[in-house]
Image (cartoon, coloured by chain):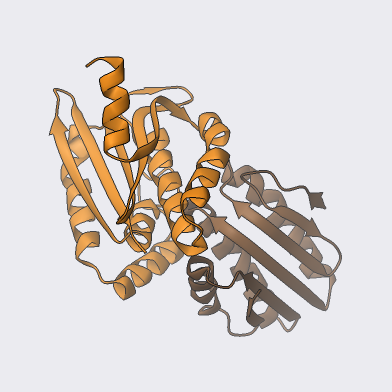
Chain colours: A brown, B orange
Amino acid sequence: MHLEATNRTPEVSISESVLEMKGECYPEDITAFAEPILELLAEKLAACDSFSVSLELRYFNSSSAKFFFDFFEVLEESAADGKSISIEWRYRAKDNSMKEAGEDFEEDMEEADYQLVEI
Amino acid sequence: MDSHDFHKLLLSRGTFFCYSGLLSEEVLSAISGIVREQVSDIDHDIDLTTRVFGIFIEQAQNIIRYSEERLAEGGIGTVAIGHSKEGFVVEAINPMNADKMLSLKGNLEELQKMESKELRKAYKQRLREGPPEGSKGAGLGFIEIARKSSKFEFDFVESPELLFVLKAWIVP
């Protein structure tokens, strides 16, 4: 799956063992954006032993926060099932909003390897 | 008010962006990119400008979802952004249902009293519990505005329909 970025949605690419997302996330319709990604992620996780995720967001709105919460929950559950899951939350230096958001999500990750990366 | 007075009024209060009328997701898509650019042109601090933009989006989506005066595509309201030497201000005004005033007032007063740590906790708790009844989003919008603003104020004005006014300041 490869989705080009729009001014309201990030670039998304999902392959067999890697998911990358980069850009801004405040879609017109969060469900329409989120569902195919969460479905495909679940499919790829079921079929692999290890999976890595790289997120580089510049902004997401509060409706999208729920999507990211669900997204991380799926990854954490998969890690709890014994898969090797690594997540990179990349944020721009000085971007405290995105740094803090990354820290918020980090709190719930115990089994998955979660790294905050300043870029 | 004459047109030129309106023009001067906006300039005198530092309002560099103002939209009034039907606000829909489609309209928001059309204006959000330029708003982001305008804010970034005024100030280059990415943290400050992301907060301003984020509050603008939450305020605009509140109007789209909850304005009492509406069309199929969205709600009627006004959203504006101003800048002065102190910082930015994002304002939104929309008609609202009087029955919801007391619960909204209580909710916002509670948020106003919270420190940043408490707001962060409230935000996470809401994420875990999911949206409250009657919410058309994640139920996080006001918590997000409280978290990202330096302070916010609200008012309910009868003119004669009930107007909800929300003003958030974002300073470095």
Residue A82 lies, in percent from the top left, at 73, 84
Residue at 79% x, 57% y is A13
Residue at 52% x, 29% y is B27
Residue at 46% x, 50% y is B42
In the foreground, A29 or B12:
B12
Which residue appears farthest toward the top when viewing the image?
Answer: B2
In the foreground, A61 or B140:
A61
Note whether residue A67 is visible: no
Quadrant housing the N terminus of chain B: top left
Q: Quadrant of residue A102?
A: bottom right
Residue at 62% x, 61% y is A57
Image-based side of B57 in relation to A20, left or right: left
Residue A87 lies, in percent from the top left, at 69, 76
Image-based side of B127 in relation to B150, left or right: right
Q: Is residue B71 above or below residue B30?
A: above
Image-based side of A96 in relation to A13, left or right: left
Residue B78 lies, in percent from the top left, at 34, 31
Residue B74 lies, in percent from the top left, at 44, 28
Q: Is residue B73 above or below residue A62?
A: above
